[in-house]
Image: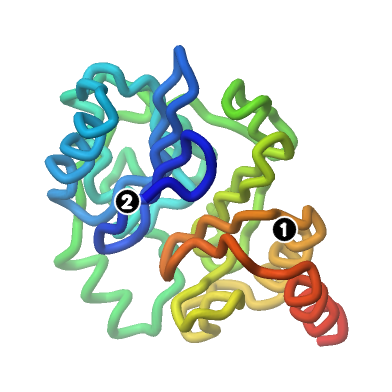
Amino acid sequence: MEIAPNIHWLETSSNVYLIIDAPHVVLVDTGTPRQQDKIFTKLRQLSHQPTDLTHILITHADIDHVGSLAALYNTSGAQIMAGAASAQLISQGKSPQHMPMLVQWIIDTFMKYGAVPQEKISVFKDGETLPFLGGLQVLATPGHTLDHFSFFSPTAGVLFAGDAIDTRNGRINLTRPAITADKTAARHSAIRLLELSPAVIATGHGSPSTNHTSDQIMQLFNTLRQE
Ligand SMILES: [Zn+2]
């Protein structure tokens, strides 16, 4: 589904987004392991081959966001871009620490994903602008996990929020506290993102929010500011 001109939402176990911005074809996040065929099928529907994929942006190294990264990279050769902490985790096939203890142990013990060598990953920093969608701002948004980044295009009005913002229950909210590494940081990150007044909020889970009002944004913003 096209959520904004040339920005396509693909629902896998978590959300991934394809940005067609010639000469670039950019994927934001990769879903759980074994989603590559679904993503490549979507690319073909958009008249592109797997090798046309030029960049893969990563919000954070949770297995449901980087699970298919290695497979996608091996087929496409796309440039991977991630934050430094994510890059380190990805090179070990590990997810960041933020789950309740037992769940975290299960993830750490049984849920490894395909690793990618660190030198294959281009590391971005907060405040950088990437050459997509008229300038895609890189924003450090720790909280849900400490390695978390979001991306915002002022030109398109689209925010790729990863798990910094959640629309799982049909409302714009924070990801639930039980799986949040640092609740204060998560609140500050969400405030920073809401301040951008994004027209579209493309989240990692739940449907992308495309028809919210500025009142709804302000309401959550004010609530978070008062906490
Ligand atoms: Zn996550």
- Looking at the picture, tell me which residue is in the foreground, 46 or 94: 46
User: Residue 4, how many percent across, how many down?
Assistant: 53, 44
Give the image quarter of residue 74: top left
Q: Does any atom of ligand 1 lie closer than 8 Å to the CB of label 2?
A: no
The foreground one among 62 and 208 is 208
- The circle drawn on residue 39 is none
Nearest the eye: 98 or 168: 168
**C-alpha separation, residue under disc 2 versus residue under disc 1:** 22 Å
Q: Answer left or right for 98 relative to 210.
A: left
Residue for badge 1 = 193
In percent of width and height, residue 98 lies at 45, 72
Residue 186 to residue 54: above or below: below
Q: Where residue 124 sits in the image (x, y, percent)?
A: 58, 31
Classify mark 1: residues with Cα within 10 Å, few (<14), some (14-19) or many (20+): many
State the residue at coordinates (67%, 27%): 135
Q: Is residue 73 left or right of residue 81?
A: left
**In this view of the protein, can residue 136 be seen by the observer?**
yes
Amino acid type of the residue that numbered disc 1 sits on in the rendered structure: Leu
Earlier residue among tags 2 and 1: 2
Which residue sits at x=19%, y=63%? 111
User: Ligand 1 is found in which quarter of the picture?
Assistant: bottom left
Identify residue type, mark 2. Answer: Leu
Which mark is on residue 10? Answer: 2
- Which structural element holds mark 2? strand
Horizontally, is 102 left or right of 165 in the view? left
